[in-house]
Image (tube, rainbow, N blue to C red):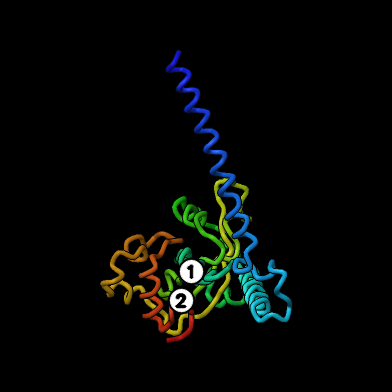
Amino acid sequence: SQIKIIDLFALGAWSVGRIAFFAWLHGPIEALQHDSWFDPRKDPRNSARNPRVAAWHRAMQSAKIKADAFRQRPISWGAEESRRSMMKYWLFKSEPFKWSWDQQKAKGEAGEEWDGIRNYLARNNMREMKIGDRGFFYHSNEGLEVVGVVEVSAESAPDSTTDDERWDCVHIRALVDMPEPVTLKAVKANEKLENMSLVTSMRLSVQPVLEDEWMEVCRMGGLNGKTLKPL
């Protein structure tokens, strides 16, 4: 019983000491919060004409202006670079007597549905495309050359030329001519392009193009692959 009494006494002393400590601590904290060094406006001896108060107000106003400007900045910083980093590249084949580059350009901003594709891999490639992806326009059978650059203007949707639900396609619009058409022969002769789908999967009508392949073909055609401006 004596041990229990001692334990209770110790617990009570600890509690009283804890209360006394926080009561003592409250004074310095409250004083700090109201100290004129912490905030000169809280010192009644200071007035609007006091240089310290005026400097404090100027600093606070400057900080507010900077904070407001920061919040009002567009959230799309680096949007163009981000878009390019996510962009994919493709190659669209077309027989010029059926649909030529000149006909594609004539469609202008409206672009044209890339219909009539009846190959599953080509269809799947189009299903992966996003608006803004770029592609080479390639004349097949006649010419056998990259003649222009297009952009995906609408993502894959049911092909309007058939009722078969298996087939869908994108819309593309012409962007720029290739200053110097890049022939299939030139592509095959370039070691950097030996694994390009145009070389390894010649019969595929809609093909993926790797970024380094895109840049190299553009270079061969006298075009900057990023800006699409002549070199």
* Residue type, numbered disc 2: Lys
**Residue 226 x/y as whole percent:** 46, 76
Which quarter of the rendering shows the N terminus?
top left
Q: How crowded is mark 1: few (under 14 residues within 10 Å), some or many (20 or more)?
A: few
**Residue 137 x/y as whole percent:** 48, 71
Q: Mark 1 points at which residue?
A: 84
Q: Which of 72 and 30 is in front in this view?
A: 30
Q: Mark 2 points at which residue?
A: 226
* Residue 46: quarter of image: bottom right
Relative to residue 143, is residue 133 drawn left or right? right
Element on which disc 2 rests: loop
- Can I make out residue 109 in this image? no
Q: Which of 160 and 81 is in front in this view?
A: 81
**Residue 228 x/y as whole percent:** 48, 79
* Residue type, numbered disc 1: Arg
The answer to which of marks 2 and 1 sits earlier in the sequence is: 1
**Residue beneath the point at 43% across and 76% down:** 225
* Residue 16: quarter of image: top right
Q: How many labels does the image show?
A: 2
Which quarter of the rendering shows the C terminus?
bottom left
**Residue beneath the point at 53% across and 38% down:** 18
Relative to residue 194, is residue 83 drawn left or right? right
